[in-house]
């Protein structure tokens, strides 16, 4: 939800719920009025918004369930119970869900190199490779899903068709890593690298370079100077293509795409393009061939979250092993305790009377 929606939702809650939500988050929350308490919670949301939203939803659901039970009426033998007991249930039952929280061993379970398994391409990988024969392609999938496989297989097919392949990355360090990886896959004689620091095997069918280097090569080609075999260029792979949105370097990606030879296919890879549909439409409008978007959201490798306190203690961040995908998740009780301890240590008022020797 947006900040405005979160603020409106907080304003609609009773003060008692806000006080419970502020426990462990806002220092001296019991002394604040509702407006100041909401402002303090919104400031905390800038640090851990997901945790605040999940706890808020959990508290709202528990209050709603408690209200429903009160409306339906207690059993006959409890009808004489004082109303104070109805309004003030036990603190443990209102602050934490009934199910036990996960432990650290469960959070860390399975970390390491998995056992070998047969590889079968995912449908989206086959779709990307199939579309690349006739169109440009944007692959927008989560990290760890297998974008590199698409790049390697597309490069292999282009090389077998006697076409030059250029692979670009935003960083020299990443280019060096890909050079080592692709050399192991394709062989040293078929892979070259061009960066500001290295120039190895520039006539190889597969060239690794930074995006700035390719943009400069395309500039030179437009002026009549051809440094590499652009006439045989069949595929340009642009890794980390979310840099299109970078306020300083995005123009480099734009110019590279605009000046890319029309006979070459473009393959843009990214895990974090915010508007891939718009980018695909833009490529379709400026390139002679259409651009096909391959997109999915399922993570092949699930994410887990932990909290490392400055004192060195590691605990799960959420009550569940995985990161909750909805507002139903809540923070781990030990993580909450460590948050409160850290706030007490850092927000404790310091003595103003300091003796100067």
Image: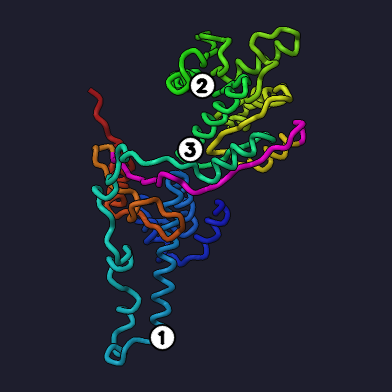
Q: Which residue is mark 1?
A: 72
Toward the viewer: 322 or 66?
322
Residue 204's disc number: none
Pointer 3 residue: 146
Q: Is tag 2's residue or tag 3's residue first in the polypeptide sequence?
A: 3
Mark 2, residue position: 171
> Of circles 2 and 3, which is in front?
3
Which callout, 1 or 3, points at the residue further toward the start of the chain?
Answer: 1
Q: Nearer the viewer, residue 345 or 142?
A: 142
Pointer 2 local density, CA inside 10 Å: few below 14, some 14–19, many at least 20: some
- Residue drawn at point x = 43 percent, y = 57 percent: 54
Judging depth in this view, the residue of 217 and 234 nearest the camera is 234
Looking at the rendering, the stretch of residues picked out in magenta corresponds to 285-309
Which structural element holds mark 2?
Answer: loop
Going by the image, does 143 lie left or right of 77? right
Image quarter for residue 67?
A: bottom left
Residue 255 appearing in the image = yes
Residue 24 seen in render: no
- Real-space CA distance between mark 1 and mark 3, rounded to the nearest whole angstrom: 53 Å
């Amino acid at each position: 939800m947006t900040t405005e929606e979160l603020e409106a939702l907080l304003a609609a809650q009773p003060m008692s719920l806000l006080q419970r939500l502020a426990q462990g988050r806002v220092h001296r929350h019991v002394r604040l009025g509702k407006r100041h308490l909401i402002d303090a919670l919104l400031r905390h949301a800038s640090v851990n918004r997901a945790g605040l939203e999940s706890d808020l939803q959990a508290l709202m659901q528990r209050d709603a369930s408690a209200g429903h039970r009160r409306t339906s009426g207690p059993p006959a033998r409890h009808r004489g119970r004082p109303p104070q007991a109805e309004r003030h249930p036990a603190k443990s039952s209102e602050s934490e869900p009934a199910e036990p929280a996960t432990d650290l061993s469960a959070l860390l379970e399975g970390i390491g190199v998995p056992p070998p398994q047969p590889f079968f391409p995912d449908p989206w990988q086959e779709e990307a490779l199939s579309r690349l024969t006739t169109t440009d392609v944007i692959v927008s999938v989560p990290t760890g899903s297998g974008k590199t496989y698409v790049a390697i297989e597309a490069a292999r097919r282009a090389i077998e068709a006697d076409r030059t392949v250029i692979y670009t990355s935003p960083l020299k360090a990443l280019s060096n890593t890909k050079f080592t990886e692709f050399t192991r896959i394709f062989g040293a004689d078929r892979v070259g690298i061009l960066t500001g620091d290295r120039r190895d095997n520039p006539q190889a069918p597969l060239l690794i370079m930074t995006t700035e280097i390719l943009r400069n090569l395309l500039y030179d080609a437009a002026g009549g100077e051809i440094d590499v075999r652009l006439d045989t260029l069949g595929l340009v792979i642009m890794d980390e293509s979310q840099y299109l949105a970078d306020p300083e370097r995005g123009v480099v990606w734009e110019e590279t795409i605009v000046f890319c030879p029309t006979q070459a296919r473009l393959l843009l890879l990214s895990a974090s393009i915010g508007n891939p549909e718009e980018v695909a439409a833009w490529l379709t409008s400026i390139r002679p061939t259409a651009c096909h978007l391959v997109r999915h959201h399922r993570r092949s490798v699930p994410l887990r979250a932990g909290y490392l306190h400055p004192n060195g203690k590691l605990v799960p961040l959420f009550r569940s092993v995985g990161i909750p995908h909805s507002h139903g998740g809540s923070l781990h009780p030990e993580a909450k305790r460590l948050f409160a301890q850290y706030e007490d240590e850092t927000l404790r008022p310091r003595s103003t009377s300091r003796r100067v020797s």
